[in-house]
Amino acid sequence: MAEATPRDLHEYLTTFIKQAVATYLAQEQIAFDIEQLPIDLRFSAQASYGDYSMPVMPWGGKNKLARKPLPLAEALATILRDMQIPAIQEITVTAPGFLNFRLNRPFIGQVIIERVLDAGADFGQSDTGVGTKYIVEHTNINSNKAAHVGHLRNSCIGDTVVRMLRSQGYQVEAQNYIDDSGVQVADVVMGFILLQLGELELPGGNERLPGETFAYYCSRVYVAIGKAFDEAEAVKESQPEKLAKLKELRKAVLRAIEHGDEPEAGPDYAVLAADISHQIVHAHLATMARLNVSYDLLTWESVVLHSGLWQRVFAMLRDKGLLEKPEIGKAAGCWVLPFGEGDTQTEEGDRSSDKILVRSDGTATYTAKDIAYQLWKFGLTDDPQIGVQFEFVPWGRQHDGRLLWTMRAPQHQNASEVGEQVDPRRFGHARRVINVIDVRQSYLQQVLYESLRRLGYTEQADNSVHLAYEVVTLSAATAARLGVDMSDGRDFYAMSGRKGIEIKADDLINSAIERMLEIKPELSPEIAAIAAASAIRYFMVRYNLQQVIALDMDEALRANGDTGVYLQYAYARANSILRKLDISDYELPETLEGLPEQLEQSEWELLRHIDAYPRSLAEASAKFAPNMLATYIYDLASHFSDFYEHTPPILKETDERVKAFRASLVSATVQTMANALRVLGFIPLESM
């Protein structure tokens, strides 16, 4: 006898389809693995067919069941009818071989509503991932200047993936890797040195402007250094000393940062770099908090270097014969990881299939440090051959109450100043690692994972995921609103921090809040800020990751259509219905005695989409696809709006059964939307 109470409609129907197939195979004496038959159960294309349909055409081939699709579908329909499944009202067959299911809507609808309201905030949650740890590395901004709009796509994607995986029971450690020892940080240190010497002019003046944050000031310093290098490059034939002096200073700063060298005289480059980085990271965290992004651990490139980890990994690579040291050519004097024939773009701008890990001056490249870091993420540095562990201390509480930890090198000189420490094995030691990094770094990620394979860590290489995404540009209208030079008349504008062509993240957020208040002046600043954050987050994740997006402020803040603001309005509208019922002293029944015999199509569509939430969330999580979750929530909100517009006001309903059903349906919608919006990183607004 069939199970009387379905949990998930898709799972429920699939179970019976498999039972019917097993019966059919036995009747026909066919030996075939049922799991090799694809069950493509979907919403019916036309309401006249029923509620769900499934094609059996792919099953009929000679390499599968060797049966004609239409008779096969008829035979399965007969078996299913004989099973007398209470949730199924009718089973039909249509050419060329579709099984169609019309469900007992009142029965199913009651089950769906009760399941949602009983589960509450846990509806959609799963224990699939219990016992498996993920590390998701995202945001990862160079600690040299203010965050810009492009960084927001990374953080919004990464934070949403973290939330999705946690919803499936996985233990997830969200890491923000701080590149505080690279060229960008060195250039800002150079800028401060040259400012002190009176040898650098900043755009807008050398002093901090009124109200200018330190991070914004550093952005101007960085642009000025970029301009200085460009000008020196332009005159290198007639005045070679200018470029040589800049390069020598950069080299000295980089070496000091990497090795922690203390100068005999003059400024301490390493200390200055560390001070700049810490102030910038505080600013970045504050910016990301405005979009409800938080982390578990800050990891620092300088700590990876100063711990000796890279040096030991380098020794492993060298001793295994995986490195070469050319004596001639562009890579002369460098330690190189050979990758065979062919040319590939590297981050230095050279076209080379081989990857430089250590430059001729002894400094490590990004890829070198990433190899060491990736090994640590998997816990491989516990190996006695490497034997490096880090220390971890609290950084502080974040906006959502989550405690943020930070990594430091062992035997930190100021250990007594930072308080609580934890077992170093608490961090790292992941089963799978997701690196959220834009597509321009795809080659370097390939090098990273191939390096793990060559070291013998094949399983870890296979469990390393590069979640690549395309860049963010600005629409012409948004670029104009934010002050970008529009003289070239382009339709959209890419960004370059070095050239100063960028929109800072805080400027975008501020502009979005101002625009929200212009559109809806009755909003409080706090509600406008939440709505603006929702709009930005949604815009950053709703597109396919491989799609370049042009951010348009007016489009992102629209109150209708596929926007974060629309989702918040739909949620607030549903809550408004419940508030009005509460004010009228209507009490929602604890249990539904039964649903109306006939449901409106809009009611049924809403019920089906509520039922689909756990499955949609699980599928999006498995594919690390925030855009799939965004599509689901938009569809759910659209179906609620359709229900709202096509049914009479619940408050005026006189049929108590209908009133109880619709009030309970709205309550289930509110619960489902709240759960889904929180996974998407929204703070759900009950009123707007």
Image (spheres, rainbow, N blue to C red):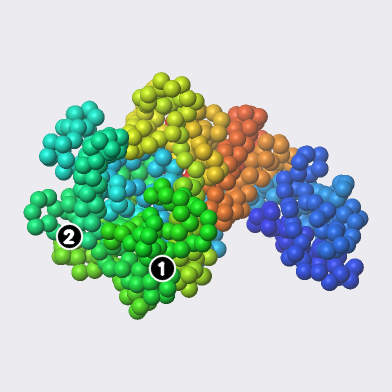
Q: Is residue 258 left or right of residue 371?
A: left
- The residue sitting at 77% across, 61% down in the picture is 37
Q: Amino acid at mark 1?
A: Leu
Is disc 1 placed on a helix, strand or loop? loop
Closest to the observer, 357 or 159: 357
Q: Please name the residue that numbered disc 2 is placed on.
A: 261
Residue 175 on image: x %, y %: 37, 56
Quadrant (top left/top right/bottom left/bottom right) for the C terminus = top left
Work out whether 658 lies above or below 483: below
Dot 2 surroundings within 10 Å: few (below 14), some, or many (20 or more)? some
Residue at mark 1: 323
Left or right of residue 203: residue 59: right
Res. 47 image quadrant? top right
The x, y position of residue 455, in whole percent, is 45, 71
Mark 1 to mark 2 CA distance (whole Å):
27 Å
- Closer-to-camera residue (254/61): 254
